[in-house]
Amino acid sequence: MSSAVSASGRPDPQDEVVSICRDLLRIDTTNPGDGSGPGERAAAELVAELLAEVGLEPQLFESEPGRASVVVRVEGDPAGTAERGALLLHGHLDVVPARADDWSVHPFSGEVTTETTDDPETPEQEFLWGRGAVDMKDMDAMLLAVVRDLVRRGERPPRDLVLAFMADEEAGGVKGAHWLVDHHAGLFEGVTAAVSEVGGFSTTIGTGSSAQRTYLLQTAEKGIAWLRLVAHGRAGHGSQVNTDNAVTRLCEAVARIGSHPWPVEVTPTVRAFLDGVTDITGVEFDPADPSALLDQLGTTARWVGATLRDTANPTLLEAGYKHNVIPGTATALLDCRFLPGHEERLVETVRELAGEGVEVQDVHRDVALETDFAVPLVDRMVEALHAEDPGARVLPYCLSGGTDNKSFSQLGIPGYGFAPLRLPAGLDFAGLFHGVDERVPLDALRFGTRVLQRFVASA
Ligand SMILES: [Zn+2]
């Protein structure tokens, strides 16, 4: 794709965003989580090149060979920086694995296709395909296009910007954001807020005449407790009576935990979101039966449903080595996600449900986050969205997964999910995350670039 040049002689950021995103998608940065992937180095070098090309001085950091992140500071207005601190804009460069055989086009092709959509406003849309198209090379490209344009114009942002493009988010950020925070905290000196995924996308709330395009801003995210159950018992011959069998004990514990009815509990962010949905649709939230309201959310219900309660899902079982031998131990892995403030209670409940003879071990934990929606920075996000999509609603929401904002919270930096995309109604956006056939509308990339330009100029 050739970059069109505007009348001013500068490349148009709305063209650049597409070509940058395509170039990033063509670099395989798969992160399987066990260190076996290609790493992010090639993508990080491209990002550093794009930043250096306009005269910025990016720094490239490797937590270990191939696991690269890029950070650059763009000097802003000193008065604004003194008053509001610096703003961190960040994205991750790694992607989750994609099996090419499952996809309609190759996941690292960066192909563009035209599709018809269910949205009468945009019946035809061009889509850019690739693993990372929405998670989150789209936002990486939007940030790069916005900042390159800003610098080319010789404009100074209203306060210092720190841009960071990270390795390893998809495996908890241990070799990316967490590593940078632990080893190079000085890069984030003076930063008072962070903006990244997963929020700013549009979804349709309500059905029929109450249907309303609504942008979800992420102001909270659930915490992570990856736990291991280890059941102990008496090893022995498979032909004998054994009332102390580790496999039986583990399975009973897994069944109790997996079928535990975690109570519905509404945190402040989720309350604000639910009130907004009620306001749009007239449907009240009933804690005893959340489904009536979730039905108003379309494909986004999958994400929101998981933010009404803590969850604990068994994901892996391991025991035994021969058909006629009872093993002395059996293990299971649990993926538990807790709402803000619920960490200790969730782990305590899992311990009780596991019962006697079953150890509960920590594998990985990370914090839950909840930040204030009523702050000027969020007002700037809402204004930028409204300037580009005047009739839309904007609501705060809680993410059921996690982002690199967890790492930056260790430095006291509140994080927001604002990677703006105006999406065609009916697109299963939640299903594209880590799903097959991940792709992003070109118009959404251009929209997001315009919104971020406005936001950065006013933040
Ligand atoms: Zn992501």
Image (cartoon, grey):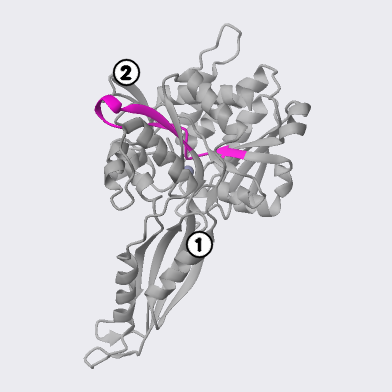
- The image shows residue 9, relative to residue 22, as above or below, that is above
- The image shows residue 410, relative to residue 146, as above or below, that is below
Q: Residue furthest top?
A: 7
| Left or right of residue 208, residue 62 in this image | right
Bounds of the magenta segment:
194-217
- Amino acid type indicated by mark 2: Glu
Question: Residue shown at 77%/33% (left/top)?
Answer: 82
Q: Looking at the image, which is closer to me, 160 or 296? A: 296
Label 2, on which residue? 121
- The image shows residue 376, relative to residue 167, as above or below, that is above
Residue 450 x %, y %: 52, 21
| Left or right of residue 75, residue 114 in this image | left
Q: CA distance from mark 2 to mark 1?
A: 44 Å
Q: Looking at the image, which is closer to me, 309 or 359? A: 309
Answer whether residue 26 is visible to the viewer in this image.
no
Question: Residue shown at 43%/40% (left/top)?
Answer: 273
- Amino acid type indicated by mark 1: Glu
* Front label number (2 vs 1): 1
Residue 224 x %, y %: 48, 58
Say few, some or many: other residues with alpha carbon within 10 Å of mark 2 (under 14 / 14 to 19 / 20 or more): few
Q: Which mark is residue 343?
A: 1
Answer whether residue 372 is visible to the viewer in this image.
yes
Q: Earlier in the sequence, mark 2 or mark 1?
A: 2
Label 1: state its secondary structure.
helix
Q: Residue furthest left?
A: 239
Label 2: state its secondary structure.
loop
Say few, some or many: other residues with alpha carbon within 10 Å of mark 1 (under 14 / 14 to 19 / 20 or more): many
Residue 346 x %, y %: 45, 64
Task: Please identify the quarter of the rendering in which residue 275 is found.
Answer: top left
Locate the N terminus by quadrant: top left
Locate the C terminus by quadrant: top right
Q: Looking at the image, which is closer to me, 295 or 427? A: 295
